[in-house]
Amino acid sequence: MNDNHLVIMAGGIGSRFWPLSTPTVPKQFIDIMGVGKTLIQLTADRFADFIPAENVWIVTSKGYKDLVRKQLPEVPESNILLEPCMRNTAPCIAYVSWKIKKKHPNANIVVSPADHIVLKADEFKRVISKGLEFTASSANILTLGIQPSRPETGYGYIKRMSEVVVPEIFKVDSFKEKPDLAKAQTYVEEGVYLWNAGIFLWNVNTIEAAFRQCEPQMSAIFDKLANDFYTEKEQDSIDTHFPTCKAISIDYAIMEHAENIYVFPSDLGWSDVGTWGSLYELSTKDEDQNVVLSDNCRVIECKNCMTHVSDKTKIVVQGLDNCIIAENNGVFLICKKDQEQRIKEFSQLS
Amino acid sequence: MNDNHLVIMAGGIGSRFWPLSTPTVPKQFIDIMGVGKTLIQLTADRFADFIPAENVWIVTSKGYKDLVRKQLPEVPESNILLEPCMRNTAPCIAYVSWKIKKKHPNANIVVSPADHIVLKADEFKRVISKGLEFTASSANILTLGIQPSRPETGYGYIKRMSEVVVPEIFKVDSFKEKPDLAKAQTYVEEGVYLWNAGIFLWNVNTIEAAFRQCEPQMSAIFDKLANDFYTEKEQDSIDTHFPTCKAISIDYAIMEHAENIYVFPSDLGWSDVGTWGSLYELSTKDEDQNVVLSDNCRVIECKNCMTHVSDKTKIVVQGLDNCIIAENNGVFLICKKDQEQRIKEFSQLS
């Protein structure tokens, strides 16, 4: 029996991709790459070869249930866990871990965000498979660490120890917050710092033990809730008690305190696609360095632009340089690429 | 009895305002000024004080009948004349003249394009009223000549004679095609050249006589067709015989040959709104010289731009200079303002 499980965390709101991403249909449910699949579909695809659909679990907000059902019809409805409110990643992971454990007491779990991109699918598969073997045979937590290609200030970093523990896997020295540029440059030079991709692997008993040690209060909440899992009372109980969990990330709650954390440095063509700029970097460019992510967009005499419009829109753009041109549902943004950090401000004007 | 009549020529397709203007809903049926009224509504409004609705006649293409009915509900349905095909202005004017004459044998007529703009409404009313008096009391054709404010190469010109005939009215020396810039500059300097606004005034008997003299063949066609006017057979007969008229403008057919042509030089704030550039010139600008013709458009750190999007679209534009940003029905154009002569090329790309 395949006891490997995939948890996709799909509760984010992706506000930095407005107007494509909106609170109603956020980034993970959008074909942001212009490839014909949404980010959550691409995420599920990445694991489809080695984790069966009945072992795929989605944790998302109540409002996104229909989107998940529509975009991932192969995932059983009972595997879609609905948070009544946002409480960051730790309560989300506790909920799904307690739920999986009730039916699969020895499950090996890989946890992945719904809205990241991995370009090197084969290497990803190799790394995850090897990682799942590691967590199946040891009571350790494994994270993926991405070899940094630049002094990125938008990601957290993982500092690894020097000695290899098993081939390719290292013990974690410490987790580091998003650094400033100077610190990021040092990290890249020192060679033992990796980007924290937010992808975690563990046996369900390992993460449960970590929660019991680091978050006893939260563990007690889910111990009680577990009585109602897989019954008609589950959603009501979750709606009542999930909001009593404190909002805290898995990094703060567990990773920075537990001792048994390991990292698998990997080169995956990974990106969190966190900004228009990162999408631009990831995407194929034409000879004038334009990224055109929609068939119904014509770009003439433009340079360094990126366009992403919906199927309902036709657009001709002439003579622009260094611009983002994005449309979703009749809401349009045209701005200079270097102003994308102001997208929240722009979205409030529309 | 008020025997003054207004003919609005509304058959154009306004291709230079794509994507706002399309063959399905061309420029004259669009609120291109962003004032809450379409150009044909503004045109009808300009005459509403002194020409009753039952004396307003619209000549348009068959495909635009519903648009006219909807936008000018006060005009009787039987006053809407439908051309089965485009034959330029002379057959259009012959048709409506023969038809008006059959019921109103002494009608005084002013002919106006549907898609021009006049900013000085009071002066326009004074000029037209005085012009109608002139054509009611003489067998002369009167045109409006606009005092040129710049050496415009996009308009035809009217050269007037020097001596005033009746106060403010001059005999026409000749009509001039659209000049090149050097010639246009000479025209403006010489002081006796006026822009041809395509607005004509005449008694129905005067224009009939001019047609009989200059276009006997076309006159014969409408003599025969007139038997069916105001009967159920009218449209069928028009559909059969109107296409046999040659395609020719009223300027070529009549104005350049007839002897009894006069001009009323006037300062009306007139424009044919022929291009995005002329709309930009006409419109109120913000402090950064932007023209924003839609409430649902926010312009930040832009200069010399003009925006015109439909009610269904919301748009935020940041950091552009000298651009046209236009949307209609999900079709979008963004281009540099100085490239607007390429709009046909752009429209063919979408």
Image: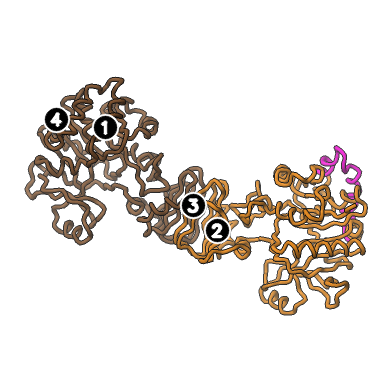
Chain colours: A brown, B orange
* Residue name at image x 17 percent, y 29 percent: A220
The chain letter for the residue carrying disc 3 is: B
Q: Are marks 3 and 2 on the same chain?
A: yes
Q: Quadrant of residue A289?
A: bottom left
Q: Are marks 4 and 3 on the same chain?
A: no
User: Circle 2: is it few (<14), some (14-19), or many (20+) Cα within 10 Å?
Assistant: many
Q: State the image coordinates of residue B110 (x, y, percent, origin top left).
A: 82, 58
Q: Is residue B301 left or right of residue B174?
A: left
Q: Are marks 1 and 3 in contact (CB under 8 Å)?
A: no
Is B219 one of the magenta-colored residues?
Answer: yes
Judge depth for marks 1 and 2 and give the one in front. Answer: 1
The chain letter for the residue carrying disc 2 is: B
Which residue position holds label 2?
A: B292
Which residues fall within the magenta stretch?
B214-240
* Residue name at image x 67 percent, y 76 percent: B182
User: Circle 4: is it few (<14), some (14-19), or many (20+) Cα within 10 Å?
Assistant: some
Q: Are marks 3 and 2 in contact (CB under 8 Å)?
A: no
Which residue position holds label 1?
A: A242
Q: Is residue B141 left or right of residue A92?
A: right
The chain letter for the residue carrying disc 1 is: A
Q: CA distance from mark 4 to mark 3?
A: 51 Å
Q: CA distance from mark 2 to mark 4?
A: 62 Å
Magenta segment's dominant SS is helix
Q: Who comes first in sequence, dot 1 or dot 4? A: 4
Amino acid type indicated by mark 1: Phe
Which residue position holds label 3?
A: B315
Amino acid type indicated by mark 2: Val
Amino acid type indicated by mark 3: Ile
Q: CA distance from mark 1 to mark 2?
A: 48 Å
Judge depth for marks 1 and 3 and give the one in front. Answer: 1
Q: Is residue B137 above or below residue B74?
A: below
